[in-house]
Structures are given as C-alpha cells and as structure tokens.
C-alpha cells in the first residue's frame, strides 16, 4: 500500500472555505456589537425625557413623572383600555410627561418618583409602596 497523496486543489478550496467562515463570523460579531451599542447609546448619553405631543389647548402635562432615586423600579403609564406608553425602570433625573386626556399610572415604589398631576404635585408615597391611580386632564 502506497502513501496517500493530498489534492492541492482540495486543500486550497478548504482554506478558502475556512477563511470565508471566519470572515462571516467576524462580520457578525462586529455588526452585533455595533447594533447593541447603538441601541444602548442614548440612555448612557443623558437621562431620557419622553414627552407625548400636547393636544390642542393643553399646556400642562396630564402627568409628569421624575425619578428621584438611583433607580425607580417599573413605572407603568397607559391609556385606559389602550396603548401602554411606558413599562420600564427609570434612572435618577429621568423624567417623562404625557398629555393624553386620561392615563392609568402604576408605580412599583412610590417613594422613588416625584409625580405631578395637571401641574399639581402628588403626595410622595412611602418606601416600597405600590401605587396605582388614574389621572384625568381638567
């Protein structure tokens, strides 16, 4: 039995295939990292300030929520029977304002946020206290 000879064209094809797979993997890693950083970038740059457009004649938000703790756990704002406008944690200094005629608000820890209803401050809750309430525009 003789020695087995390798095919030079077969080795070249294998080398090209390995390089192609390595190149695709590199592009996927770079692209995934760039996408992740672009999605995360605005929140790292400065606190988020969400505002929905005021309706005709409305100058004061129906509800304004400002995070006054390092983290304000799960703040939920929704239009009753409709869209969820916010469902997430907030960070210190972050504030949101909404101008819809009626809003349901749920605060997981009412002591961590400062809430203004139609321009009037709402009493701050106790630490760890969950609050759920509805705000209607005047």
Image (cartoon, grey):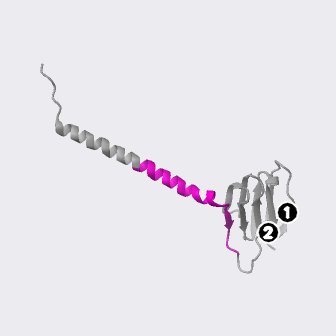
**In this rendering, is residue 120 above or below 84?**
below
Q: Of discs 1 and 2, which sits in the foreground?
A: 1
Task: Categorize mark 2 by other alpha carbons within 10 Å: few (<14), some (14-19), many (20+).
Answer: some
**Residue at which label 1 appears:** 122
Where on the picture, by quarter, is residue 117?
bottom right
**In this rendering, is residue 95 above or below 12?**
below
**Residue at which label 2 appears:** 136
> What number is the disc on residue 30?
none
Q: Residue 126: x and y, percent?
A: 86, 51
Would residue 28 appear left or right of 133 to someone viewing this image? left
Q: The magenta stretch spans which residues?
A: 27-54
Name of the residue lying farthest toward the bottom:
57
Would residue 64 appear left or right of 40 to someone viewing this image? right
Question: Is residue 135 or residue 127 the one in the foreground?
Answer: 127
Would residue 79 appear left or right of 6 to someone viewing this image? right
Question: Is residue 81 or residue 64 the one in the foreground?
Answer: 64
Q: Main secondary structure of the magenta part?
A: helix
The answer to whether residue 47 is magenta is: yes
Q: CA distance from mark 1 to mark 2?
A: 13 Å
Q: Residue 89: x and y, percent?
A: 70, 53
Q: For mark 1, give the secondary structure.
A: loop
**In this rendering, is residue 77 above or below 73?**
below
Question: Is residue 17 or residue 98 the one in the foreground?
Answer: 17
Q: For mark 2, give the secondary structure.
A: strand
**Residue found at x 72% / y 67%:** 97
The answer to whether residue 33 is magenta is: yes
Task: Categorize mark 1 by other alpha carbons within 10 Å: few (<14), some (14-19), many (20+).
Answer: few
Q: Residue 74: x and y, percent?
A: 72, 52
Name of the residue lying farthest toward the top:
1
């Amino acid at each position: 039995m003789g020695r087995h000879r390798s095919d030079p064209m077969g080795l070249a094809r294998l080398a090209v295939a390995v390089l192609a797979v390595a190149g695709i993997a590199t592009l996927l890693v770079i692209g995934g990292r760039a996408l992740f950083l672009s999605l995360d970038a605005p929140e790292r740059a400065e606190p988020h300030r969400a505002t929905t457009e005021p309706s005709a004649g409305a100058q004061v938000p129906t509800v304004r929520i400002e995070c006054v703790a390092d983290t304000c756990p799960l703040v939920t704002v929704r239009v009753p029977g409709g869209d969820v406008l916010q469902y997430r944690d907030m960070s210190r200094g972050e504030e949101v304002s909404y101008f819809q005629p009626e809003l349901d608000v749920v605060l997981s820890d009412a002591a961590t946020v400062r809430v203004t209803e139609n321009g009037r401050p709402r009493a701050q809750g106790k630490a760890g206290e969950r609050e759920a309430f509805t705000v209607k525009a005047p």
